[in-house]
Image (cartoon, helix red, strand yellow):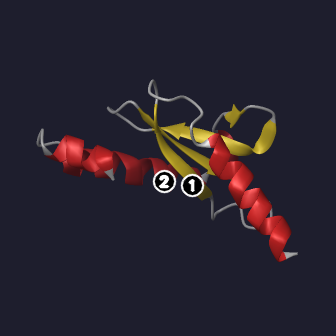
Amino acid sequence: MHEVRYYAARGQAVRFIAAVIDALDACTRTPYSFPKVGNNPSLRRVLTRRFPFALVYVVNPSAPAEPLVIAVAHGARRPGYWRRRLRRSAAKARAKV
């Protein structure tokens, strides 16, 4: 992951990884408590502490404690780049049916 290398070069990799893990723990414990992204009620995001990143995830209604992380997205760079991942995963799900 590019971000880990970036923060490793600055001596911050462990803190960055810990912030991502904390955000993942938070969305696992209370997946519906974080803001929705767009009009999709299952698509949410949780911000990391001390770093300008968010975990964008999908809540599975049948298993809400197992969110599917779509992206660890920078708050200012390439907004919405991860949206194509949603389209690809939806197309794969339709193909399996």
Residue 60 seen anywhere in this rendered image of the structure:
no
Residue at x-position 70% and y-position 59%: 89
Q: Looking at this view, name the residue that lies furthest to the bottom.
A: 96
Residue 10 seen anywhere in this rendered image of the structure:
yes
Residue 53, image quadrant:
top left
Q: Judge from the rendering whether residue 20 lies leftward or rightward of residue 59; answer left or right.
A: left
Residue at x-position 85% and y-position 66%: 94
The front one of 71 and 62 is 71
Q: Residue 32's x, y, as percent?
A: 70, 46
Task: Measure the alpha-carbon separation of dots 2 and 1.
Answer: 8 Å
The correct choice, above or below, for 82 with respect to 63 in the image is: above
Numbered badge on residue 52 = none
Badge 2 local density, few (<14 within 10 Å), some, or many (20+)? many
- Earlier in the chain: of badge 2 and badge 1, it is 2
Q: Which residue is mark 1?
A: 69
Judged from the image, the secondary structure of the residue bearing numbered disc 2 is helix
Residue 11, image quadrant:
top left
Asked if the residue under mark 1 is in contact with the one under mark 2, i.e. CB atoms within 8 Å, the reply is: yes
